[in-house]
Amino acid sequence: MRFGHFDDERREYVITRPDTPLPWINYLGSEEYFGIISNTAGGYSFYRDARLRRLTRYRYNNAPLDVGGRYVYLRDDASGDFWSPSWQPTQRELEDYACRHGLGYSIISSRYQGISAEMLYFVPGGETLEIWRVRVTNERAEPAKLSLFSSIEFCLWDAQDDATNFQRNYSVGEVEVEDGVIYHKTEYRERRDHFAFFACSEPLAGFDTQRDAFLGPYRSWDRPIAVERGASSNSIAHGWQPSGSHHVRLEIGPGETKEVIFLLGYAENPRDAKFDPPGSQTIDKRLVRPTIDRYLQRAVVAEAFEALRARWTDLLGICQVQTGNEHVDRMVNVWNPYQCMVTFNMSRSASLFESGIGRGMGFRDTTQDLLGFVHMIPSRARERLIDVASTQLPTGGAYHQYQPLTKRGNNDVGSGFNDDPAWLVLAVAAYLKETGDTSILDVAVPYDNQPGTERPLYDHLQRSIEYTLERRGPHGLPLIGRADWNDCLNLNCFSETPGESFQTTENRSGGVAESIFIAGLMVLAANELADIAALRGDGAGAARCISAAAEMRDVVAQHGWDGAWFRRAYDFYGRPVGSAGNDEGQIFIEPQGMCIMAGIGLEDGRGRMALDSVRERLATPHGILVLQPAFTRYYRHLGEISTYPGGYKENAGVFCHTNPWVMIAETRVGNGDGALDYYLRINPSAREDLSEIHRGEPYVYAQMIAGKDAATPGEAKNTWLTGTAAWNFTAISQWILGIRPEHAGLRIDPCVPAAWGDFTLTRSFRGATYRIAVRKQPGTSGRVTRLRVDGRTVGGNLAPLPPSPGAEIEVEAFVEATP
Ligand code: BGC
Ligand code: NOJ
C-alpha cells in the first residue's frame, strides 16, 4: 500500500493523504539555517546548531508524534469555520491534499469548501531565513472574505534549557513588534547578539506574541481562540511562552488568487551595535531590515526558489544514470545524494529520531558521511575533513564526537572507540580520488585543536594506522576499546546499573577484547594509505602500510576465520564472538562485509564461502540482518547489543548501514545478481508498495528495518540521519554500476545482473564530463575489459584523467562475458 508517489520529473515525492503511518519529513536549508518539516507542516528551525540556536519549539515524542510547526490557519469570515490547509493541527477533512517534498523545499496544498491553498516552504541560498509563500485561491462562484493566520512558537534558543528550566524561562521571554514584524529577543538584553524575526508581506489586521493569548487557556493548536474568534489580541509576550502569529484579512474574488509571504529568520548584530538608539534596549534593525524587505517581494521569492531548483539540478548533474531500473535511477539520480547532503549537514542531530539536543558530530559518522558527499561540494568536504582531523588526539585516536559550534572534541563522550581513526583515512582517500587535490595532505592540522601541535594532514593519517597497530591483543588483532562500528558491542563494559552509558563506561579493565571488524577496516585503510604515500613519493611509508596490511590479513586468516565465515571479535576473556560455537550471535554481518571489501578471502575462496553463509543465515526479504541467532537475554559481557529485543537495532535488526558492505563484497567476488538483489531489498523506492509495513518515508533510507525475530518485521525506524545513505550511494554508484574515482582516472567496472543489457551514465570528474555507454549483452555476466575513449581503444577499464578541464569525454565500456 502507498501513501503517495514519486514525481521523477519534478524530483518530488508527492504524499497524497496526510495520515501517513509516521510523519514523513523533509529538510529545509543546507548552509547555516535549517529546518525539518513534516507532511503536515510540523517541525522546527535552527541556526547551525539544533540545540543551542533553536528558533522554534517542537514537541517530539508526543501524542501525536509531530506537535509544533509552521502552521497557517484559514478562516471563512462569513461562517466562522476555520481549517488548516496542511491538515494538522485542526484535522478538518480536506479535498485534494498533497504534500510535495522536493529538494530543500516542501509544498503543501489542499482545498476546503471551494478555497484552495498552497504553502511553499524553503530557505533561499545564502540567507539565514525561511520563506513561507502562501497562495489562496477562491474557486467559489462568490467572493470570499477570509482570515489568514500564521503561527509559530519560539524556542528560547537553548533547546535543552528550554525544555527544563521553567522557573527561569517563564520570566525571560521578550519580543518587539515593529512595522508588522515580530522580533523574538529573549536574552538579547544580555549575552546574545542574535534575535529572530517573523515578518509578513501584507498589512496586518492584528498579531499575537503570547502563546496563551493566541491559543486561549486550556486550548491547543487545533482550535486557537484567536482563529476561532477571527481576531488577534495584539498581545506582547512578557515571559511565559513567546510565540508569533500574524492575522491578515483577504478578500478574494471568484477565480482569483492572493499570495502572502511570511519570513522567519535569524539575525545577528555586532556586539557593540545591538541597540538603536544606543543605550536603549530596542533591537537595532538597520542591518536586518533590508533583507526582510527584499524577501517580502514576490519576484524575489520566485527567483530564489528557481535558484534553489537550479542549484540541485547542477549538484545532481554530477552523477546521472539511466539503467532502466526505476528504483536504481531515482535513488541514484535524486534521493540518495539528497539524503547524503542532509546527513552531511545534520550529522546525527535533528530528525524525528534524534532530538538535536544530545549528540555532536560523530568522528566515524562524519567521516563516513563524506563518502557520499565528496563528489557534490568538494570544498565543503575539504573543510569538514580539516575540522574532524583537528579534533584527532596526538595518539592517533579520536574524540568520538565533536561539537559543531565550537569544533572541539566532546569530553563527555571521550575517546577509545578504536575504529574511529581508520575512517579518517578512508574519507581523505575518497576526497583525493575525487579531486586530485593532494595539497590537502600538507595542510598543517593541529591535534586536539591545540595550537603548536600542527602537523601535515598526512601525519594524521599515519598516526591513525599506527593507533591500531599499537593497540593489539593476544591474537595480534586490534583491541576493540569501548566499541567499534557497532556501538552496542561493548566488551569492556559489564554494566549492571540502569541508565549507565554502555558506550562510555568501562567497568572492567585488563581484558583482551579484540575486533576482527577493525582488522578488516585497518587492512582497507592501510592499503588506501599506501596508495596515498605512493602519490607523495613516500616509498618507505607505502611499504610500511603494505606490510602492515599483509600482516593483519594473515592474522585474520589465522584467528579471524570460523570455518564458514569471519568471526566478529574476541571478548574480554579471549573467547570468540560470532562463532558457530556460541549459543546466540553465531554470525555477524560486519566482518563479512568489511574483510571482503578489504580483499581478505578473495584468493582462497573464503570470501565466497562467507557470503554464502550470509545468504543462508542473515539474508531476509527486508534486508540482511546484523546477526543470528538473536540474543534472547542480556549478556553482561556483550553489552548493549543484548539489551534490544530480538530483531531490533543492533540485535538482529537489518542495520541498513552494513548491507552495502555486503553488496560491495558481492561485487568483489563478481556476483552482480547478488549485489543488486541486496540493493533492492532495502532500496526505499523498491519498498514503496510496502509502505504500511515499512512505515518510514519511501524516499530515504532508514537506519534500521526490523528483522525477522521482531514482532514487526520490515518496519523501518530512524529514517534520514544514517551512514546508510553514504554507503548505499557508494555501493550502487561505485561498485555495482562501477563508476569509481581513482587517483589515476575513472574506473569503469560495473558488476550488474546478468539480465541487464546496455546502460548509460554521466559523471563529472576532475572538471570534465564523462559520458559513458556500457555495452553489455543481456543474459551474460562479465566485466569490462576494454574501453573506447573518444574513439581510441584503451585496454582494461580505467578511463584516463581528463586532458583538460571542461572536456567532454565519450566513453564506451565493453563487458566481456565470462564463459
Ligand atoms: C544505538 C546505536 C548508537 C548508540 C550511540 C545506541 O543506543 O543502538 O545505534 O550508535 O546508541 O548513541
Ligand atoms: C549509529 C551510530 O551513529 C554509528 O556511529 C554506529 O556505527 C551505528 N549506530 C552502529 O552502532
Image: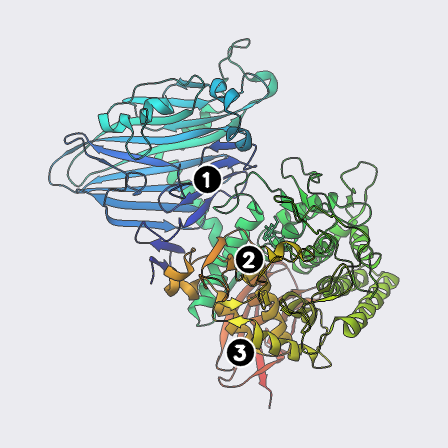
- Asked which quadrant contains residue 149, the reply is top left
Q: Which circle marks residue 673 in the picture? A: 3
Who comes first in sequence, dot 3 or dot 2?
2
Specify the amino acid type for callout 2. Lys
- Asked which quadrant contains residue 802, the reply is bottom right
Specify the amino acid type for callout 3. Asp
Q: Is residue 783 shown above or below 637?
A: below
Q: Residue furthest bottom?
A: 819
At x 15% / y 32%, what residue is drawn? 79
Front tag of 1 and 2:
2
Q: Is residue 321 visible?
A: no
- Where's residue 332, x and y in %? 50, 63
Query: Rounded to the nearest whole Å, what is the CA distance between mark 1 and mark 3?
Result: 43 Å
The quadrant of the picture occupied by the C terminus is: bottom right
- Where's residue 70, x and y in %? 38, 36
At x 56% / y 77%, what residue is drawn? 616
The quadrant of the picture occupied by the N terminus is: bottom left
Q: Residue furthest left?
A: 141
Which color mode does the image show? rainbow
Q: Are marks 1 and 2 in contact (CB under 8 Å)?
A: no
- Ligand 1 lies under 8 Å from the Cβ of mark 2: yes
Specify the amino acid type for callout 1. Pro
Q: Residues within 10 Å of mark 3 (few under 14, many from 20)?
A: many
Q: Nearer the viewer, residue 382 or 727?
A: 727
Instruction: Read off the residue under disc 2.
Output: 649
Q: Which circle marks residue 124 in the picture? A: 1
